[in-house]
Image (cartoon, rainbow, N blue to C red):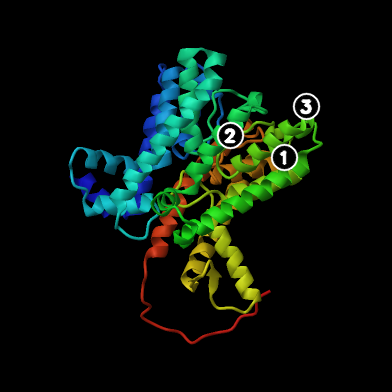
Amino acid sequence: MGLRRKAMRLTPPALLASFYLILVIIGGITLWLPLSHHGDVRFLDAFFTSMSAVTVTGLAVVDTGSAYTVFGQVVIAILIQMGGLGLMTFAVFVLSAIGIPVGISQRLILREDLNQSSLGDLAKLVRTIFVVAVGCEVIGAVLLAFIFVPASGWAYGIWQAIFHSISAFNNAGFALWPDSLTRWVDNPLINLVVPALFITGGLGFIVLGDLYAKRRWRALSLHSKLMISGTVALTLWSWVMFGALEWHNPGTLGGLDSIWAKVQASWFQAVTTRTAGFNTVDIGELHDSTALMMMTLMLIGGGSTSTAGGIKVTTFIVLLLATVAFFRRSTTLHAFGRSLGLNEVMKVLALTTVSILIVFVGLFVVSISHDGSFIALAFEVTSAFGTVGLSMGTTTELDTIGRVVIMCVMFLGRVGPLTLGFFLARHTVPKVRYPQGQIFLG
């Protein structure tokens, strides 16, 4: 009873973070069991894999396909599903399914888990999340089976299709091959199905629900319009830029035989960067300029209430709108016939500042214990915070301190913004008002 009372005194974000951490610990212990691996996985390796799965990141220190048994792979898939859709989403769905009413305390935690500002229609949103997730993953698995079954046989081929469908929709990036999906770099089905899954999962369930309910651009909410237009713009820009920067690089696009293969590979890397984590070319062979571009996209991430990480596309758009408004000497932001106030700008500034600080502190600590390439270290830390999972090969080279730092950054990248959002949502009226002062900026 004492422990339960202490737990109930915690704020909803603190409880949510605790639940995620408990799941990571349970997952780590399960993956460490002899039943889960082939004998070459240490406890820290299992714990790292569990953290990466729960935070839907995809960074790995051992090869998932060869180091873990099928049972261990099933555990990883379950951790990915629970981490991607949210622990409280699962809890509320189960309670609703068996007829148990969801109390206000559970709704508060669910609100934080789904990054919502109100308690209304949370049960409806949970049902939407499950219908969309299961539907997309089933369709994805069926389509991927046409690729994996001929290559691996019926039993393991079907499992590979299910695993990669779950991993793709939840933007986890876990693959059952050490080179990810590079062997299918020019396969049209892979280049369509896998991106379709992580783009759908990365848009956000609010956007998907809005699209299903209204089905007309003019009727969509401002959030949906910003998210869709931002996703399209970032995808097209990164598609063109990746192709232009890597076209003649023999380690990536330059080694491919045809223009069509290069176009497909450019497309895949353009969309996977914003938190999906799969790759069809060798990320370690990227030019520094391309790596820097991909780091920017990883930091931006996907959409709110989605399986993606990062500061989110809408946050990035509001930052751009605020910058334009400043140079135009405007006090309000405008987009699609709607205005945004100072409160939204303050929120995105706080979120972006905290995110950048986490990345810089993580990079600083990792660089103390590891003297590798700076761009590669920065790539790993940014990938961890954005819960992306793309790697230039540095993760496996890190010592214990480096791996622990990466795990902390992954955890903060998944749970930290939710906790920050809770404090941003709390309105306090100052008891004392001070006279205005002036400082000089720039």
Indicate which disc, 1 or 3, sits on the residue closer to the N terminus: 3
336 lies above or below 74:
below
Q: Residue furthest front?
A: 216
Indicate which disc, 2 or 3, sits on the residue closer to the N terminus: 2
Label 2: element kind: helix
The picture quadrant where one finds residue 399 is top right
Label 3: element kind: loop
**Residue 346: horizontal and vertical position, in percent?**
50, 68
| Of the two numbered discs 1 and 3 in the rendering, the one whose residue sits closer to the viewer | 3
Q: Residue furthest bottom?
A: 435
Residue type for callout 2? Leu
What residue is at 45 percent from the left and 31 percent from the top? 139
Q: CA distance from mark 1 to mark 3?
A: 30 Å
406 lies above or below 13:
above
What residue is at 42 percent from the left and 17 percent from the top? 34
**Residue 380: horizontal and vertical position, in percent?**
62, 40
Dot 1 alpha-carbon crowd within 10 angstroms: few under 14, some 14 to 19, many 20 or more: few
- In the image, 363: left or right of 212? right
Tell me the number on the disc at residue 257. 3
Indicate which disc, 1 or 2, sits on the residue closer to the N terminus: 2
Question: Which of the two residues, 394 or 282, is positioned nearer the viewer here?
Answer: 282
Residue type for callout 3? Asp
Q: Which residue is mark 1?
A: 373
- In the image, 400: left or right of 376? left
- Res 59 seen here: no
Tell me the number on the disc at residue 192. 2
Q: Which quadrant of the rendered structure holds the N terminus?
A: top left
